[in-house]
Amino acid sequence: MKIAGEPSFRDSVDLMFNRATALMDLSPGLQQKIQVCNSTYTVRFGVRLRGKIETFTGYRSVHSEHMEPVKGGIRYALSVNQDEVEALAALMTYKCALVETPFGGSKGGLCIDPRAWEENELEQITRRFAYELIKRDLIHPAQNVPAPDMGTGAREMAWIADQYARMNTSDINGKACVTGKPPHAGGIQGRVEATGRGVQYAIHEFFRHEDDKALAKLSGGVEGKRVIVQGLGNVGYHAAKFLSEEDGAVITAVIEHDGAIINDKGVAIEELRQWITKTGSVKGFSGGEYVIDGAAVLEKDCDILIPAAMEGVINLTNAARISCKLLVEAANGPVTYGADEILRKKGVIIIPDMYANAGGVTVSYFEWVKNLSHIRFGRMQRRAEESRHILLVNELEKLSADKGLGWTMSPNFKDKYLKGAGELELVRSGLDDTMRSAYQAMREVWHGRNDVEDLRVAAYIVSISRVAAAYQSKGL
Ligand code: GLU
């Protein structure tokens, strides 16, 4: 989306990159090598649908191959264009480096309104697009591994994996050619919730640091904090659901493409999601006040604002009126370069996209590893872990009985402690650990240097240093 008077999305990412590199000691040559997008493949293909040939345009952009495979989702939207996929591919490079997933950055997109087509038509279109990318190794377990993004999900990823299997019948690692597959088709537990879960873990980590909270003029925990979420798609829905149902945050407004629902006592996220699934709209939902002007609701006072929809939604036209303390970029690029400057001056703390929404690619990494190892996480150790716990609990109970100590364990404790971790628990634990470590790496730069004023620049510095180190060890 190009906003009048503002740089394009790609240029906005480059300007943010430049703010960081101005504070780094990189050779101009290396800086340029990291910044440029290595290649963008454009494909136009025809599919016979409804009695005539429809032509579609798709892209797969590879930003950096300092590590392979390269990684990044495939987006289905009418607004997809080369500038956008290149910006998103660049963000994938920095995101993967920041959360230490061993991938370069890539992104794909297809100009299509997915709602305009029936499921079987979408399958034909997806398979044809995948065919074009697979035959050029732009989908490949060792070279380029897509995942879901806006407008796509597990269903599309299963079609892509199957298309790859048909074209590479003897590739034993074929399932690792794409992530975000449904669990029955080689996926992993917890991938669907992963990006939203990562947003929750990012907020938890932020709230663990008193001085960071103080900078945002926040205190206490997440409980009771007033949160506004823009976009109730996969990411926004899971983030809002976990923050409200598990952490006690109050979702005071949800903004969607056709208006917003406001409820100062808290919007019931699960009910609203079901309403949207049923009616296709937030309009008519009884659990809050409906407002048609969603853009105005973005400016409503709150503690935490979570844009989880699209790039460029906070820009020069509205940044000055944004009234939150903490802004968590669950979408990619929701704040333009100019808006970022205005928000910083206002004292809004921004948790940047490349960190806040990295939960998706983190769990994609776990799925890719699972596919390559051909075994579910926890399968070997779960019962061994349980047996050792049982041994310990039995021993304690025996000691208590022998010595007449009368110790009893609460049944709740026993249930929880005796249960070995299954795949979902392990995925969440790995994700939580990743989000904590990445935040701490950013934070060290943010507070450790006098010239770094915000988390975004800190995130870029951490990522770019890691990418630079990878290039240097390749001899560049
Ligand atoms: N599309 C998601 C993102 O922007 C996930 C990418 C992936 O899992 O490879 O981060």
Image: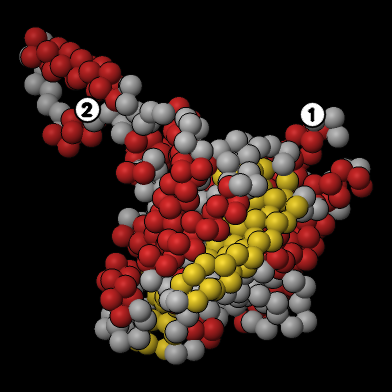
The residue depicted at 36 percent of the width and 57 percent of the height is: 242
Which of discs 2 and 1 lies nearer the camera? The answer is 1
Q: Quadrant of residue 68?
A: top right
Residue at the right extreme? 28
Coordinates of residue 194 in the picture (x, y in percent): 44, 50
Density class for disc 1 (Cα within 10 Å; few <14, some 14-19, many ≥20) is few
Q: Quadrant of the N terminus?
A: bottom right
In the displayed structure image, the side of residue 418 where residue 463 appears, left or right: right
The residue depicted at 32 percent of the width and 44 percent of the height is: 184
34 or 340: nearer the viewer: 34
Q: In this orientation, does residue 335 appear?
A: no
State the SS at label 2.
helix
41 or 28: nearer the viewer: 41
User: Looking at the picture, does residue 177 appear above or below residue 248?
Assistant: above
Coordinates of residue 267 in the picture (x, y in percent): 33, 74
Q: In this orientation, does residue 162 appear?
A: yes
User: Looking at the picture, does residue 336 appear above or below residue 218?
Assistant: below
Residue, disc 1: 473
State the SS at label 1.
helix
- Residue 418's disc is 2
The answer to which of marks 2 and 1 sits earlier in the sequence is: 2
Coordinates of residue 446 in the picture (x, y in percent): 70, 49
